[in-house]
Amino acid sequence: LSKSTVSRALSGDPRVAESTRVRVSSLAQHMGYRPNATARALATRRTNTIGLVVPWVPRSLSDPFYLEFLGAAGDAAMRSGYSLFLSAPDGDGAGAVRAHAELADPRRIDGMILTEPKANDERIALLHGIGLPFVVLGVASDPEVSWISGDNTAGAFDAVDHLISLGHTRIACITGPPDQTASKARFEGYRSAMSGAGLPIDRNTIEAGDFTQPGGHTAMRAIIDSGRAPSAVFVCNDVMAFGAMRALREAGLAIPADVSVVGFDGIAMAEYVDPPLATVNQPIQELGRMAVQILIEQMSGEGGPAHCVLPVQYRPSNSVGPPRTRAEAINRG
C-alpha cells in the first residue's frame, strides 16, 4: 500500500475501500500506532478544542451549577474527540468582550460555548463577526444564534404558584442581574404567577442580586430593612437563596415558620442546607451534554441554528410552608 492510501485510511477518507481501511486499522493497532493530534490539527486546520467561557473564577468555582455543567460538557467533549478550554474573564463589560475576542481565534479553538447572555449582547455580535461557530447557554434573541436553556419562566411560575397555593400573598423576589436573559425570564414567571392570582407586587420587596451568596444576603437584608416583611421569597438561584436564608436567621426570622424560601437550579447542595431548600430542578448535566452536541453539529455545518428549551421541575421541600395566621403572629410577638 502507498503512504497516501495508508494516510487516507487512517483519517477515515470515504474514498478508501472498507476492506483496505480494516486492514490498515488492524496493522496500526498491532503496531501500537497512535495518531499525532498536533499533526492532524495542522493538516485539517482544526484544533479539536472547544472554548467555554464562564463567569469570573471566584464565582464560577463556588457555584455548583457551573461545576456540574462543566463536568458534563467536558465529558461530552472528550467522548467526541475534543478537549475543553476554560476561560473565566475577570469582570464584565469591555473586559469580558475583549477576553472573548482573544479566545475566539480559530487557531486556538474550533467553537465556543457562551454563558449568561444579555439583551443586545456584544459578545454575540463579536462571534458573529468573526464567523466562529458557537452556542449559547441561555436564550439568545437573535434567531440566527444556537442556544439551549432550561424553561426559566415556567419553572419560576410553578415555584411561586405553589407558594400562592399555600396561602402566601406577600411574596418577595430576589432576581439575578437585570440585564441577563435568564434573570428576566425567571422574574417574568414570578410576575405572571402573582398577576394570575390577582396579587399585587410590592416593589419594596423586589431586589436584584448577582447570583452569588453574598448578593443574596445583601438583597434579603434590604427587603427586611424596608419594613415590608414578606411571608415568602422566591430567589432566582439556589446560591443566592443560601445567602438569603442566612440573612433571615440573622434577623431572628424562622424558615419556614416566618418566611418561606424557594430557590432555582436544583444544585445538590440545596438538599443539605437547614432546612432543605425548595427549588426548581434544572437538567444541568443534560444542558452540558446538549450544548456540546449542538456546537459540534454547528462546527460540522449540519443544519441551521438550534433553539432548545429543556423542561424543569419544581421540587418542594422543608423551606416552604403556609404563612402564619394573624393569631400566630400576635402570639409570637
Image (cartoon, helix red, strand yellow):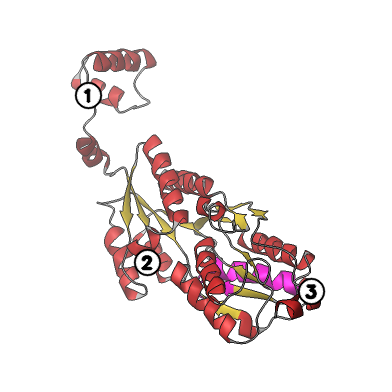
Instruction: Check disc 2 and give the amino acid type.
Output: Leu
**Foreground pick, 22 / 1:** 22
State the image quarter where residue 276 is shown: bottom right
Instruction: Using the rendered image of the protein, determine whether residue 212 is visible from the camera's viewpoint.
Output: no
332, above or below 115, in the image: below
Question: Where does residue 35 sit, x and y in percent of width and height?
Answer: 24, 29
Which of the 4 quarters of the picture holds residue 132?
bottom left
Q: Secondary structure at mark 1?
A: helix
Q: Which residues are magenta?
A: 174-195
In what quadrant of the picture does the C terminus appear?
bottom right
| C-alpha separation, residue under disc 2 versus residue under disc 1 | 40 Å
Q: How many C-alpha atoms fall within 10 Å of the one at disc 3: few (<14), some, or many (≥20)?
A: few
Q: Is residue 333 left or right of residue 267?
A: right
Q: Give whichever of 13, 143 is nearer the camera.
A: 143
Of the residues under marks 2 and 1, which one precedes in the sequence?
1
Q: Earlier in the sequence, mark 1 or mark 3?
A: 1
Q: Position of residue 61 (x, y in %)?
A: 37, 57
The quadrant of the rendering that contains the N terminus is: top left
Location of residue 158 in the rendering, given as x and y in whole percent from the top left corner: 70, 61
Classed neighbour count for the residue bearing mark 2: other residues with Cα under 10 Å, few (<14), some (14–19), many (≥20): some
Q: What element does badge 2 sit on? A: helix
Residue 325: mark? 3
**Mark 1 = which residue?**
4
Q: Which residue is mark 2?
A: 126
Q: Quadrant of residue 27?
A: top left
* Residue 290, x across and y down, in percent: 50, 45
Q: What is the spatial separation of the Cα atoms under label 1 and label 3, in whole angstroms?
A: 83 Å
Q: Is residue 49 visible?
A: yes
